[in-house]
Amino acid sequence: MLTAENQCELSLKDLHNTQVETTVLQDQSADVVLAPGSSVLSVTCRLDVPSVFSFRHNSRDFTWRDIRGKSRALVSNRAAYLIPAGEYEGAITITTHENADLRLQLMSYAGFVSSSQKDNLAMGVFYGLCFSLALYVLIIGRNLRDIRFKLYSFYISCAGLFFLVQEGQLNLFFPDIVWIDSWHVSIIFAGFTVFSAVLFITRLLDMHIRWEKFTRYFLIMPAGAVLVMPFLSVMAVNHELSVLIDAVMAFSTLIIVAIVFCLVCYAAYLRVHTAGIVFFALLLVLVAMVFRVLLTETNPFLYHYGLILSFAIESFLFAIATSERIKRINENRIAAEDEAGKDVLCDVMNRRGWSAKAEQVLKLQADKGGYLCLLFIDLDRFKRVNDLHGHQVGDEVLKVTAKIIANGSRETDVVGRLGGDEFVALAHFMKLDECKMMDNRITQRLTDFAVRTSVGEITVNASVGSQIFEQSPASVSEMLRAADGAMYKQKKSSAGAHKILAD
């Protein structure tokens, strides 16, 4: 018979008839250790005021039975029952698939509501983070057509759903759906989380390319097995087999995380892009997994919240890593485009690259007005240089010519080599005088200029055809034809003469 007020006496008996007794006081908590299998927890209370008896029931199936007095189940992410004032007696049958600490709390109704609101708010922020990151990365990565972004979104979504089921927030919206609280539903989402994480990380760091066979046999296939195990657990013929499958899944997951962590360490050592970020993120998850699987009774807080906290940080770090990946992809794409549009010999644009940039300059003049100045440059008697001194010397002359044109132009001007000994320079000015200044400057520098080559100094001259456009030409081709014509007129004219043809 209870003599103290506002407390509950607890008596736990498991399958082996091991009995443990403890007491939980008002606004305090008490811990009991559950062995795998079914246990019966007897609850005997004497209360001055109605109070809430609660515990976290994730990964545990339970039934509550009133023996004396009538309790009322509350809608909460926890198993929570409002116990009436006076004497009460009830029994809870709990089935768990692992050794686990069960923290039982006895709180006033107002205290319980306040605590639940804070917990749900914190978890709501966490879920918002997960699904916002998943959607954000999916949207920004859609046009890049890179599977890494889809895998990141898939992984974060699976993990978010896993925690949503495990933490019981779905009970707030669907309190009458029993399967939402099922341990099997929780581990099914856990399996998807492990599988999607392995796919994402191996793709992010290109492990499937660097270590193809090892990744396939020691990561992808084991992760696939972990994905299947929850379904095997559901179909297990007895509870003991289900518990065994769940234990194998837990340790397999820990081993997979350890293998991935080791590979990421090696990738970081090799200075693989973003491997350092992934290393730190996985380190946090690995520590949390150790507390979750091996050190289950060491620290109840880390056992329950460690994985959530580590995943929240990991989500941010993986988002950063994915962002860096996007940046690298864009840089590689731009570099590839630049490389495709670049003349390797002269370090200026080739015809393809120059034409693309020239289109942009045409649009700029159409929008802002002003003048376009196009110089078409052709080396005089360049074939003779090749015939007398060889193509190596000819290449040296081309390089110097390109450098003179580039140095005589602004950074915003478009300089290119169309092929052979033909060069072009296109500039946009707001004043006509600026066009004439650029024309004169480059023409003077290309008139009988000396080139130091491997066979000595050679004097070279270039014919420069200039065309100024006050109105935007219809196309780049039309613009080139006009400047080409001006260049040939210049080449045919007397030495030193240079005619500017205004459009």
Image (spheres, rainbow, N blue to C red):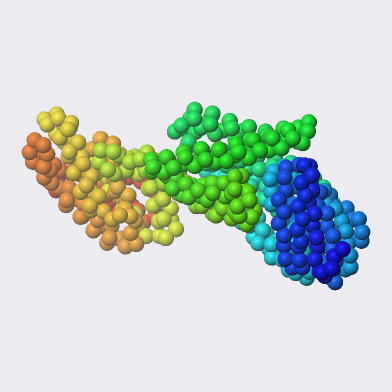
As drawn, 341 above or below 55: above
Work out whether 209 lies above or below 400: above
Q: Position of residue 293 (x, y in %)?
A: 61, 44
134, 44: nearer the viewer: 44
Q: Name the residue located 33 percent from the left edge and 41 percent from the top edge.
A: 342
* Residue 352 in view of the camera: no
Q: Is residue 238 left or right of residue 423?
A: right
Relative horizontal placement of residue 214, taking residue 9 as reference (left or right): left
Q: Is residue 491 left or right of residue 426?
A: left
Judging depth in this view, the residue of 101 and 194 nearest the camera is: 101
* Quadrant holding the N terminus: bottom right
x%, y% of residue 434?
27, 60
Nearest the viewer among 370 and 329 is 329
Which quadrant of the view contains residue 335?
Answer: top left
Residue 3 percent across, percent down from the top left? 84, 68
**Residue sitting nearer the eye, 269 or 394:** 269
The picture places residue 483, in percent across and down from the top left corner, at 30, 45
